[in-house]
Amino acid sequence: MVCRAPQQKARTSAMGSGVVELQRNSTNWAKAVGEIVKMERKIFPKHESLASSFAEELKKKNSGLIYVELDGEVVGYVMYSWPSSLFASIAKLAVKENYRRQGHGEALLKAAIQKCRSRKVHRISLHVDPLRTPAMSLYKKLGFQVDALIVGYYSPDRDANRMYLEFDSE
Ligand SMILES: CC(C)(COP(=O)(O)OP(=O)(O)OC[C@H]1O[C@@H](n2cnc3c(N)ncnc32)[C@H](O)[C@@H]1OP(=O)(O)O)[C@@H](O)C(=O)NCCC(=O)NCCS
């Protein structure tokens, strides 16, 4: 993938402890997205994977990606979007296996929530396989509630919990 503005310095907004937001047109875009697509393929089965559409999803106007980089290696990421001014959604969250249980998943999710809040949306929703216990536990820890079980969401034998986090109107 060719970077659109090679002369431009890498622009990432630091969010603390290696958490950065991927900026369009930054020189590290292709490297970061390449690493993330690899992780996506490794971590998720085909029916849950966004690997083939990741770069395209990211080019959409209302989408964002935050990742954790440690010593130049991407170890986790969260992808989110805000299709309307009313709601946002978390499309994907993952941390490399050997970097789990060190607070990166929580830091990523908090950063994405913060970003969505800054867009003044009222609600963030997501889908997660109920069998993904660590993810279910993390989402509940940060206040997400189960809205409905969507039978056959991922594949005929894989369901999803639809979850949401609502903000008080200010
Ligand atoms: C879900 C995931 C992102 C969590 O990342 P992580 O960096 O290990 O999470 P953290 O260390 O920040 O833990 C934060 C909270 O998550 C929950 N959690 C994380 N790992 C857990 C585990 N193995 N068992 C139960 N709860 C767990 C806990 O609530 C934890 O809070 P605590 O430390 O106070 O108990 C990671 O396990 C992952 O990548 N899983 C595979 C991909 C996935 O399922 N993605 C979500 C669906 S899109």
Image (cartoon, rainbow, N blue to C red):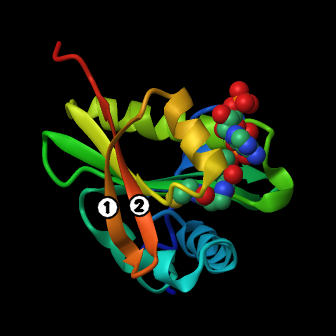
Position of 110 relative to 29 (above/below)? above
Q: Label for residue 150?
A: 1
User: Which residue is more in the foreground, 49 or 113?
Assistant: 49
* Circle 2 residue: 160
Can the viewer see residue 16?
Answer: yes
| Residue ID at (17%, 12%) | 170
The answer to whether 80 appears left or right of 75 in the picture is: left
User: Which sits earlier in the primary sequence, circle 2 or circle 1?
Assistant: 1
Can the viewer see residue 14?
Answer: no
Q: Secondary structure at mark 1?
A: strand
Q: Position of residue 62 (x, y in %)?
A: 25, 56
Q: Secondary structure at mark 2?
A: strand
The answer to whether 26 appears left or right of 32 in the picture is: left
Q: Amino acid at mark 2?
A: Ala
| Residue ID at (27%, 68%) | 60
- Estimate the spatial distance between the alpha carbons at disc 2 and disc 1, rounded to whole Å: 5 Å
* Quadrant of picture, ligand 1: top right
User: Where, by quadrant of the figure, is residue 18 drawn?
Assistant: top right
CB contact under 8 Å: marks 2 and 1: yes
Mark 1 is surrounded, within 10 Å at the Cα level, by few (under 14), some (14 to 19) or many (20 or more) other residues, namely some
